[in-house]
Every structure is written in structure tokens, then in C-alpha cells.
Image (tube, rainbow, N blue to C red):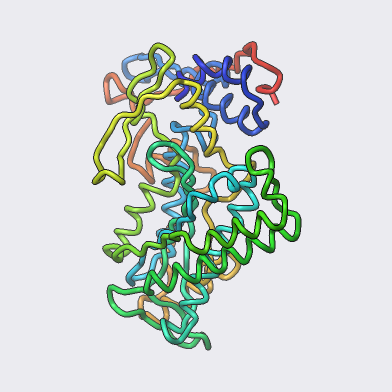
Amino acid sequence: MADIFRQHGPAYRESHKLPRNHFRVMRAIEVCRTSALGGHKDKCDNCGHLEISYNSCRNRHCPKCQTLRKEKWIEARSEDLLPIEYFHVVFTIPSELNLLVSMNRKVMYDLFFRTASETINELVNDPKHLGAKAGVIGILHTWGQNLMDHPHIHCIVTGGGLSTDGDRWVSCRKGFFIPVRVMSALFRGKFLDLLKTSFESGDLLFPGSISHLKELGAFESFRKHLYHKKWVVYCKPPFDGPKGVLKYLGRYTHRIAISNNRILSNRDGRVSFSWRDYADDNRQKTMNLTADEFIRRFLLHVLPARYVRIRYFGLLGNRNRKNNIALCREFLGTGKTVTKEKIKQETWQEQLLRICGIDVTRCPVCQKGRMCRVERLLPVRCNSPPELRR
């Protein structure tokens, strides 16, 4: 990804008007682990091997900077897991909404999160289904395998919850959560109702090809048409216990639109990458795009600045999570939450070793000595457009 941005990014920025956060993401990926960010020189205390390491950009859209952040997050979440079934629910909106979403990302993503959480909370609180307060982790993904817009929210939901009076644990039926037809109908109704509210409050913008939707009549016609579209809500079989939840979290939580290992080539102004075509029996295929089109599709999935794409609801809401988890464990008879003792002022190398078992301080040549820092390398100034220096 960095090579593509370095090679084709300048021309793309010249020919396209980009928002500031897109400039920042491109710049961060371009300079990640290069002399532009500085670094350090290490020497093995056994064989004398010298190695230069450059600093990471730490941008959440960078394919090289997610591993440690992901593992730390998973470690924190593992302390909240209960010995129960967990379900995986996926909410997807019709493709007809994609243009409106792309022009109003923050408003529409917030609306999406609110609708998905309210749908689950309302149904699990209903005595006909569960009659309890469940816990939900919602994870926003905005892409499909072909890098086009495909907003959807993955929800990890506890297979049960605290009773409405808070004095017992209520389990759902084994292997079954809530009928997807019921969830789909309620999700559609809530989403379109909140969409109307957003329109009436003036929160939505209608530039370019959707400018006709500014008119009340056209917007209402568009909104009513969406009642007849298919709103996909999919409830997958329950995870294989808490270990299955952690395995899933490790694959999906800190994903970006495309990883480096899916990019096959970058030659002659074209980029090819592997993708899975779900509409064609999940066949593995290769897509070949111009570099401009590839960059355009990647930037579709740059989130608004400081936007939170992993959210917690119900029992797992940030305000009362600790107390709720402790109460659930008491009712389930599993005792108090066991937390690992925190290591004060832990370096990132120590964190990586403790969490992932990867020792980056071991000499890669002799495998015996330790790499000790002998010199700090200051960032090297490079000539770049003013927008990229902000």
C-alpha cells in the first residue's frame, strides 16, 4: 500500500480534491517505517550485528500498524468474557443508500450504530424473546471484498442477559437468538424513521448526484422505496465458546479495507489484488484496477477524524461494564473477574512479547544476543505538499 501511495499518490492528489483527513492517511502510510519518521539503530551484544528500525505511523488505516493495538484490545476484552454462548449478528443496509452514506459518513454511521443497538436492545428486553438486558459489541465495516462501499455492522451479542430487575441471569434458548425476520423488520423501520428525523433536522447534505433529494417530495419517495428493499440481518450460529469469540475478534476488529498480503502487483499504472466473490459461490478472483481507481476505492473507507468504529451497548456499555460483568459472573457462579497484574511503564517491546510471544529484542542473526539501542535517528525532513505536513 505504501509503495502504491508513494508512486501514484502525488498525481492523484493533483487531480482530485481531497479532504484533509484523506491527505493525512495517505501521508502516514507513505512515510510509515521510513527515515521521515525517525527511528533508532540497534546493535547485538553478542555478535555485533547492526540493524536500523524506523518508527511506525500508528495510523489506524495503515496495514502495518494494527497488530499490537489489536492484541492489546483483545487482551482487555478477554477479561469481560463470560462462560456462555455468544452470537454473531450482522446488519447491512441496502446499496441504494451508499451514495447518501458517502456524502454524510458521520451522520449516517451514527444513525446505523444507533439503529442496530436499539434493535437488539428492544428485542432482547421483550419477554417474548428474552426479557433481559444483553451485552453487545458493535464493529463497523464499510467495505466489500472489491473495495466498494458496503457498510455493515458486526455485533457480538451475549446469549442471555441480566433480568429486568437485575437479580438473576436469563439464558436464551440454546443455539438460537432472535428470528432474523423480526430483527430485519424492526431494523428497517427504526433506520428509516431516524433517517426522516435527520432530514427534517437538516443534518443531511445532498451534493452532486443526490442534489434532487433536497426536495421533500423526492426524499420521501426515495425513503418509502427503501421499505420495499431487502434489509439483510444475518444471525450466524453461536461462537464456539469464549475462545471462538477471541478468535473472531483477532480476525475482524482492527481490519482495514485491504491488507498488504492481498495486493498482488503494482505495475504499469495498474494494481491487482485478490478478492472473494460472495455472489459467485465465494470464488477467489483477481481484480485489476488503474492505480487511480484503486486509491479512490481505498479512500472511500477512511473514517471521519476521531470516529469510534468499535462501540459497546447494554451490559457492556462503558459506564457500568465492570459492575455488570461482576454481577453476571456472580449469577453464573464463576466468581470474580480475573485480571492480569498490569506492568507499569511497559515498553511496546515488552507488551509485544507478553501478549503475542514475539521477542523483537532477540538478534535475528545469532538468535542469542540482545539488540541494544546505540543511536537515535532523528526524522528526516522531506519535500511534500503543505497539505501533507499538517
Residue at 62% across, 27% down: 23
Q: Position of 282 compared to 235: left or right? A: left
The picture places residue 11, in percent across and down from the top left corner, at 57, 15
Q: Position of 2 compared to 87: left or right? A: right
Residue at 40% across, 21% down: 271
The one nearer the camera, 284 or 25, is: 284
The picture places residue 78, in percent across and down from the top left corner, at 40, 59
In the figure, 364 relative to 101: above or below? above
Residue at 41% across, 76% down: 329
Can you see residue 261? no
In the figure, 200 relative to 172: above or below? above
The picture places residue 192, in percent across and down from the top left corner, at 58, 63
Quarter of the figure that contains the N terminus: top left
Quadrant of residue 377 within the rendered picture: top right
The picture places residue 157, in percent across and down from the top left corner, at 42, 67
The one nearer the camera, 153 or 390, is: 153
In the figure, 289 relative to 78: above or below? above
Quarter of the figure that contains the C terminus: top right
The one nearer the camera, 343 or 35, is: 35
Q: How many marks?
A: 0
Can you see residue 215? yes
